[in-house]
Image: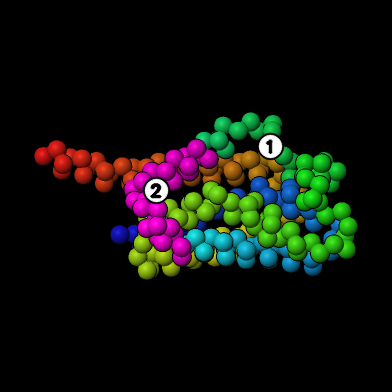
């Protein structure tokens, strides 16, 4: 049985890879361009807290959803592992020339956004974009929600859920800090640094996905062997 800190580290790695706050930096910069530093901080804080809240809801409701739909843990482990692996493979195989540059100028960043996502007027309350679309679905999207439900059923004990909750809090804090430092980070890491980080995290996510599939298949194989005896 894994100790508390190992569960927290594993859960944090899986969740932060799916949330991937670095990928949201270009949209955050474009949508908060022209507003004050205080307002940008408020947007970052609200987005981080909202991400924590959404994932925590699925942490608490995950078991009830499984019981309601009659889904077994191994089935969801296999499906979650496949989703992890596919997302990791997509990141690893992605053409680097198509990765957006986080340090691009305002004009090109705004062109990639839908008109209703732009913050053209500095007097507009930019905090209104923190929950939607920044927190949901850019940060706490389907992948992160699925990851939470897989993890909560993989680690059902009380102390394990506390470890997962600690990982969710750490993910929210990380999102807040990354968005708060979006402008200096975009200049410091550049496009190449973001790509390298994404590739490394994708490798870890892919390995976690394969392990989840193995964990899901193992009890099914044991049942089949016992049934054949």
- SS type, badge 1: loop
* 97 is higher (above) or lower (below) than 146: above
Which residue was labeled with disc 2?
76
Q: Where in the figure is residue 195, as x and y percent of width and height?
A: 63, 40
Quarter residue 214 falls in: top left
Q: Where in the figure is residue 77, as x and y percent of width and height?
A: 38, 47
* 206 is higher (above) or lower (below) than 19: above
- Is label 1 in contact with label 2 (beta carbons under 8 Å)? no
Which residue was labeled with disc 1?
99
Q: Nearer the viewer, residue 116 or 101?
A: 116
Quarter residue 52 falls in: bottom right
Q: Residue at x 48, y 43 (%)?
A: 84
Q: Is residue 77 visible?
A: no
Q: Main secondary structure of the magenta part?
A: helix
Residue occupying the far left of the picture = 229
- Left or right of 72, for residue 110: right
Q: Is residue 84 visible?
A: yes
Q: Where in the figure is residue 72, as x and y percent of width and height?
A: 34, 51
- Left or right of 36, for residue 154: left
Q: Alpha-carbon distance for marks 1 and 2?
A: 31 Å
* 87 is higher (above) or lower (below) than 37: above
Task: Tell me if residue 12 is in the magenta stretch.
Answer: no
Chain part drawn in magenta: 60-88
Task: Assess disc 2: are there few (<14), some (14-19) or many (≥20) residues with their C-alpha within 10 Å of its C-alpha.
Answer: many
Q: Which mark is residue 7?
A: none
Task: Assess disc 1: are there few (<14), some (14-19) or many (≥20) residues with their C-alpha within 10 Å of its C-alpha.
Answer: few
């Amino acid at each position: 049985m894994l100790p508390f800190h190992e569960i927290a580290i594993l859960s944090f790695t899986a969740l932060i890879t799916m949330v991937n706050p670095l990928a949201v930096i270009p949209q955050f910069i474009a949508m908060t361009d022209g507003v004050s530093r205080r307002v940008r901080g408020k947007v970052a804080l609200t987005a981080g807290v909202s991400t924590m809240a959404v994932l925590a809801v699925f942490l608490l409701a995950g078991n009830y959803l499984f019981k309601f739909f009659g889904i077994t843990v191994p089935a969801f482990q296999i499906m979650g592992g496949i989703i992890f692996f596919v997302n990791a493979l997509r990141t690893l195989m992605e053409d680097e020339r198509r990765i957006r540059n986080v340090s691009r100028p305002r004009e090109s960043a705004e062109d990639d956004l839908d008109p209703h996502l732009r913050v053209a007027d500095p007097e507009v309350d930019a905090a209104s974009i923190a929950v939607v679309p920044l927190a949901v679905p850019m940060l706490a999207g389907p992948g992160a929600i699925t990851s939470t439900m897989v993890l909560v059923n993989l680690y059902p004990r009380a102390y394990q859920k506390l470890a997962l909750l600690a990982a969710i809090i750490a993910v929210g804090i990380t999102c807040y800090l990354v968005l708060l430092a979006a402008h200096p980070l975009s200049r410091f890491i550049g496009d190449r640094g973001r790509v390298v980080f994404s590739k490394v995290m994708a490798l870890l996510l892919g390995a976690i996905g394969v392990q989840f599939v193995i964990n899901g298949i193992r009890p099914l194989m044991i049942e089949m062997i016992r049934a054949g005896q």
